Image (spheres, rainbow, N blue to C red):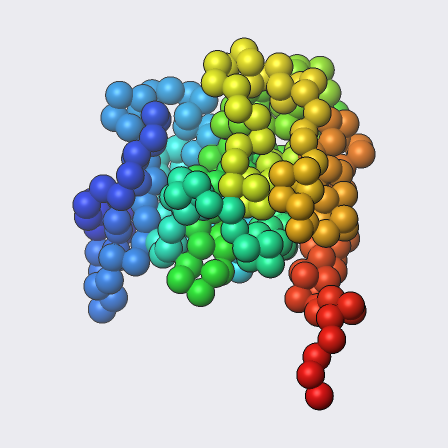
Amino acid sequence: MYGSWEVGPQLGEGTYFRVFRARPSEGSFSGWDFALKTIRPEYKGDRLLVQRLCREADAGSEITSAHIVPVIDTRPGSFVVMPRVWGQTLSQILSQGKPFPLGSAVWTTRQLAQGLTHVHEARWIHGDVKPDNVVLSSTGHATLIDLGFAQRIDLSLPCSSRKCDRQGTLRYLPPEMLTTSVPILPQADTYSLGVILFELITGRQLYDQTSTDAIVQAQLSQRAPNVRSLVPNVPGSLDKLVSQMLAKDPLRRPSPDAALVKTLAAVEIELLSPDPKMKFAA
């Protein structure tokens, strides 16, 4: 038992945390429709992991969005409880090695951008936007999960002050999170979202390096390839947007707010519109 929660079979685990099915121990509700996340027993005394779990609880209780999983209960530093999100992760879908249809790729990205808008409006940065943390339902609804690397927006503190350097997954971290001298802006999430959009469109990773040092160097200095050079039917507006999202300089990226959502929606409409050169039979 964890507080007022009954714990069932394990759903998954990472290096430091485990996630279990859960349900309320009291009342008439009996479904295992919740997920309880806790620190693995061998790391229970780790202060940084306790802080991470506390940040996740704070962020998850302050952010309200249909595309961000909320935290509905917590014991500070011990566990957090969230609604269970049903579907497949983007990483499971991408592992099939096939690109998304362009319309679906942009639609999925727009949903995530909408969720991130609410994250940033609440003065948080998600900090770990990656395919493993995106769940698609059977109807295509996208939900961003795992706020374990969330950090409050604080322009006065460089990355090293919050121990954020090299946290998260290297392939999706923006260049500024691989240095220790600049504050982290919401545009950090824009970059990670841009990497996801690149993968959805092309069906391949942004960079093919395998070693840690090589991936870091590529993120810091290697220019991202244009998606149109890999997928010729990508419209110029989408090709330009992906390049902007993947800019090395965070100030050259679109702000992850309503304007980015609006731009993605415009690309969706363009993809759905018939080619003006097409002729239809009367």
| Residue 117 appears in the figure | no
**136 to the left or right of 237:** left
Query: Residue 31: percent from the left, percent from the top?
Result: 24, 62
Foreground residue among 282 and 23: 282
User: Quadrant location of the C terminus?
Assistant: bottom right
Residue furthest to the bottom in view is 282
Q: Is residue 6 above or below residue 40?
A: below
- Residue at (43%, 34%) from the top-left corner? 53
Foreground residue among 223 and 127: 223
Total marks in image: 0
- Residue at (36%, 56%) from the top-left corner? 86
User: Quadrant location of the N terminus?
Assistant: top left
- Residue at (30%, 34%) from the top-left corner? 13
| Residue 208 appears in the figure | yes
Q: Is residue 54 above or below residue 139?
A: above
Foreground residue among 74 and 86: 86
- Residue at (73%, 70%) from the top-left corner? 278
**242 to the left or right of 82:** right
Residue furthest to the top in view is 213
**200 to the left or right of 225:** left
Q: Is residue 43 above or below residue 35?
A: above
**225 to the left or right of 45:** right
Query: Residue 160: percent from the left, percent from the top?
Result: 63, 16
Query: Residue 65: percent from the left, percent from the top?
Result: 56, 57
Query: Residue 132: percent from the left, percent from the top?
Result: 43, 39
